[in-house]
Amino acid sequence: MENFSKKKFIFCSIIITIFIIGIVPKQFQNDTFFNISIGKYILENGIDMQEHWAFTNGLTYTFSHWAFDIFTYIIYNLYNFVGIYIFTIFISILTYIILFYCLTKRTKKPIIALVLTLFFSYFICDMLTARSQIISFVCFIIEIYCIEQFIDTNKKSYAIILLVLSVIIANFHAATWPLFLILFMPYIGAAFFNYISSKNLFKKIIKFYEKKLKILPESSKKYITYKENLEIYTKLLKKEEEKTTFKILKKDYYNIKNIIILLIFILLSGLLTPIHSTPYTYIIKSMFGYSNFGDVKSMSYISEMQPIKPITHESLILFMIVFIVFLVFFPTKIKLEHGFLILGLLYMTLSSNRYLYILILLGLYVLSDLILQCSDIYFKKEMVLLEKIVFHPISIIICLIATSLFTVYNLYVTKDVKLVNEELYPTLATEYIKENLDYKNIKIYNSYNFGSYLMLNEIPVFIDSRLDVYCSEFNDTDIFYDYIKAANGEVYYEDVFSKYNFTHILLYDDETINLYIKHDNNYKLLYEDENFSLYERNVK
């Protein structure tokens, strides 16, 4: 790596490590709780593709992140929630050190890579949570780097890494495995446009004539004709090469054959998992399966699957502003495949906000290229001087102190924050249930958002945040449909409660249903705190 020693890499890695420790969110999301429960079940019973945590019988389950579930449970079993928090910090640090390394390898400018890594990691720190997506993120970062290196060098080592990454995602987060394939499309698209370009056509014609001229006698008419044609197409190729495309950079060669062969092997690698065809069918079922909601898919009711509102996401606004400024207002050019990558991920992000983090993480590859071009044009000498200043021992000490103070302050501010948010998860109500009720044999109506916490405590649930268990796209069931209708007050709650024969109702205090149930004589309030209410049903 040009002008980038191991000492500099270690320094930058230390800065990233200290910084990331200070921005990793302390509280868990609901996925963490079912990850623990499922991991425990798999280690004790194996994977049977059946649902064991809902009180409704006959449901199937995809086990789409079984490997991550096992890792999460092992850590929890050894070190409780603190261990999972530390594990999340470790994976987060690893993710951004890898991102920094890849950006530096590409730009040869560690300052650009470090600033981009720290700046955008701060604005998308919400992604750093104990969910299977943290494994997917680091895999996608490495994937883009390896795809481009494979195209440039044709080394088999990068192909092997891509195959390994594919298998990892298929087992740690199968729902995102199709995206691993989709990320090849910008490069295949660029290769296709290169293949049908006039420049490539002229090269093929020239190669044809050169081959024929070697075997034809110079006195033949065909030789003379071919030679004249060769001269014509050589001139045309020269004119084509002299053309400049506005803001677009195109490669001369993509080796599309090797890319397609590699993609075929990756497509088959999705079979290397104990969860059968889930990597292939998960996205198909979620997008095209039968929905109780008619033309609206069940997934659209989940907040992270809904279309993004750019004005509410400062990270997206910042990224797009920086990207547009460097592309439009400076004499920079974007690679054709990078243009396809940004457009594709931007479309996916606008359609579903779950792709925002992927857009920014992978978009940094594109942004770093644009900034590098700009710095080479305007600040080439200054960048060399800046690098000397930044990596001077005094500057290193100042950076370490500043970063440490930032992290210490953040940790101090959040020192009283509990890993499990008692406003979102019924920790005290759960204790009451386990101490006072026959909790393994009751049927509780619960919210989608905290069902996983009940799972962790071995309380059978009505629903939890594993949508693929409760929606009609994956199972022949009305559970998610009935839950949405009841929770939104679109149907009489008692009709749904009678259908599932609930014995108890556990609600957020501010839920719509709670406003009615608290005045319903058919329900007896058993427990109440600042955030949750527990009722016994059918007490008349």
Image: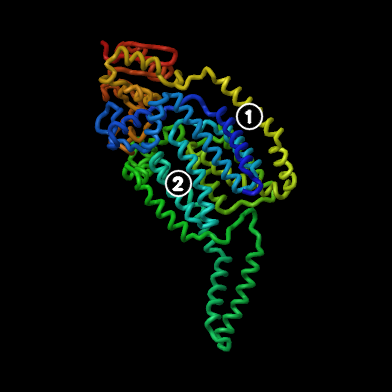
Horizontal side, residue 136 vs residue 311: left or right: left
**Element at badge 2?**
helix
Q: Nearer the viewer, residue 231 or 116?
A: 116
Q: Horizontal and vertical percent for residue 408?
A: 60, 23
**Left or right position of 471 against 257:** left
Task: Give the residue type that dot 2 points to.
Answer: Phe
* Residue 403 image label: 1
In the depicted structure, whether residue 514 falls above or below residue 46: above
Pointer 2: residues within 10 angstroms few (<14), some, or many (20+)?
A: many
What is the number of callouts on the image? 2
Residue 108 visible, this angle:
yes
Res 532 → quadrant: top left
> Residue at label 2?
180
Q: Which residue is drawn at 47% across and 27% down?
A: 85
Q: Relative to 266, is 125 above or below?
A: above
- Cα–Cα span, label 2 and label 1: 34 Å
**Dot in front, 2 or 1:** 1
The residue located at (51%, 34%) in the rendering is 92
- Where is residue 518? Give x, y as percent: 37, 12
The quadrant of the picture occupied by the C terminus is top left
> Which amino acid type corresponds to the residue marked 1 in the rendered image?
Thr
| Residue 321 in view | no
Q: In the picture, residue 387 is in which quadrant?
A: top right
SS label for mark 1: helix
- Along the polypeptide, which appears first: circle 2 or circle 1? 2
User: Residue 464: percent from the left, percent from the top?
Assistant: 36, 28
Q: Residue at x 49, y 47 (%)?
A: 143
